Image (cartoon, rainbow, N blue to C red):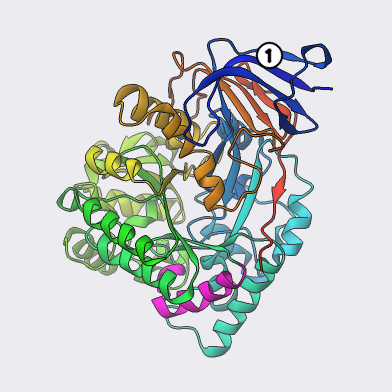
Amino acid sequence: MLDILIQNGSIIDGTGKKAYIGDIGVSGGKITFHTDKESAARIINASGKIVCPGFIDFHSHGDMVLGQDFAKLCKVSQGITTEIAGQCGSSMFPVRPEKLDLYQTLLSVGTATYPDDMPNWTTFARYLEYAKQVPLAANIKFLVGHGSLRLAVMGYACRKPTKEELEQMKTLLRECMENGALGMSSGLIYTPSAYAETEELIELAKVVAEYDGLYATHMRNESYDVVNSVKEAIEIGRQSGVRVSISHHKVCGKPNWGLSQETLKLVEDAIAEGIRITLDQYPYTASMTHLNACIPPWYFTEGIPAMAEKLKDPDIRKKLKAEIEYPKTPFDNYVQNCGGYAGVFISSCPVTHEAEGMFLSDYAAQKGIDPFDALCDLLVMNGGVGTAIYHCMSEEDLNRIFTFPHTVVGTDGICRAMEEKAHPRSFGTFVRAICHFHKEKNLMALEDVIRKMTSLPASRAMLSNKGILAEGYDADINIFDLEQLEDTPNYVHSNQVCKGMETVIVNGVVVYENGSLTGQHGGKILLHHNK
């Protein structure tokens, strides 16, 4: 008995093999090619359509908005059936209840609401008790954030951990790994993760390596010092033996464009040496993160709200302005990377909504003030919280990184509410990758683009039975119309579904069809158990 029979589709199996016309069945949540039309409960005519494995979002922040309808929609509407969440050093666990305010400001870039149960998430095991009760459209596998570990043990202390503090972080991390976390992520431009030295990261990565887990890193610098940052990520892999993922690999700031040739050569050489490295990338030339990322990390030693309070002091502002506007101040300077305030696009502010949808320079002109003061005023009025889109990358680097053999696709999507402006990557990444790199640029065959979204990330995230249309594999399946496929989300209207994605099936359950969620939940929590 078949639950679903998909007939006459152009099947792309995810391995890179050429497409072929055929039928595929779904039975008990699994794929089968033993297709009997008479026994099918439902038949889908896929004539003229592409049938491929569900896409794997290798870089997700979906854990922050777990189970919310807009969060489900932004993923499955572009064909994502599995997410690797807990990225950039921030995870929803382990929590220390007495520091809840610090956690919530740390996580505020990714969510506007926090479940009442959050103070109880002191361990990954306890967080899983909550997560397993949440209806999921897509599958999800979790990383633990280094920033969350450090916050639990050290708060925002800008120093090396003591031996005892490092052991406490290792203990927390080991509990996460024992209970099925995939590994650890770091966000080395964000505080408190930014305060860690390489030695600390190596010692924690050794714990992850015991479980054959993954260390995913938002590197220390993605602009003028991107080469050294890649070297640090490689060295962590070399000394710990851990699998390494370089998150949303990019080169920011026009003076640095082209350095991807050097970074990719470093990765290539490291892989030849035996170090296991994956890169993920979203297919846009603008990034998105906290508006407060414009501020150097040494202003955050007491947390984000305290940083915003400091900006009320004229003397601090004078010093800060000189640091931001001097190109050689040693931090990943987002204002400089964008060529100035005219490249910083304000996407969301919890209080000053009138600034949303404007470049900082235009907002400053409207207010009749200096753009630097506009930045500081916005951070003060919004308690240090808000998001911005940073136009900082080149098309040439984007294309070079995507076509690199060890690059997979990840959204890095942040969507806190349907009515709140975000980056188009939240709703559009996977469809854009097909449209941009295959339909428009013809840089890669469709089968090769889809492999970067399916079997390759499945192998790198150690997802068994996913990423390939094969007998007995999990029935995570997309059906789309290549001719109609269009990444409609843009920087002004970010939260809209792409065109052409017709049906999305997760573990045999149709979760998205005809432009809408079906209300069915096929997603599962995926645990990592390798020791």
Q: Quadrant of the C terminus?
A: bottom right
Placement of the N terminus among the 4 image quadrants:
top right
Residue 416 falls in which quadrant of the image?
top right
The span shown in magenta is: 193-211
Q: Can the viewer see residue 364 in this picture?
A: no
Q: 448 or 495: nearer the eye? A: 448
Residue 410 place in picture, x, y as percent: 47, 43
**Amino acid type, callout 1:** Ile
Which residue is at 69% across, 61% downward? 529
Q: Is residue 83 left or right of residue 522?
A: left
Q: Position of residue 437 (x, y in %)?
A: 34, 30
State whether residue 311 is above or below residue 364.
below
Count of labels shown? 1
The part of the image, by quadrant, that contains residue 175 is bottom right
Identity of the residue drawn at 21% across and 48% down: 370
Q: Given the current orientation, which residue lies at the most extreme bottom position?
A: 163
SS of the residue under disc 1: strand
- Residue 487 coordinates in the image, percent (x, y): 43, 24
The image quadrant that residue 86 belongs to is bottom right
Badge 1 is on which residue? 44
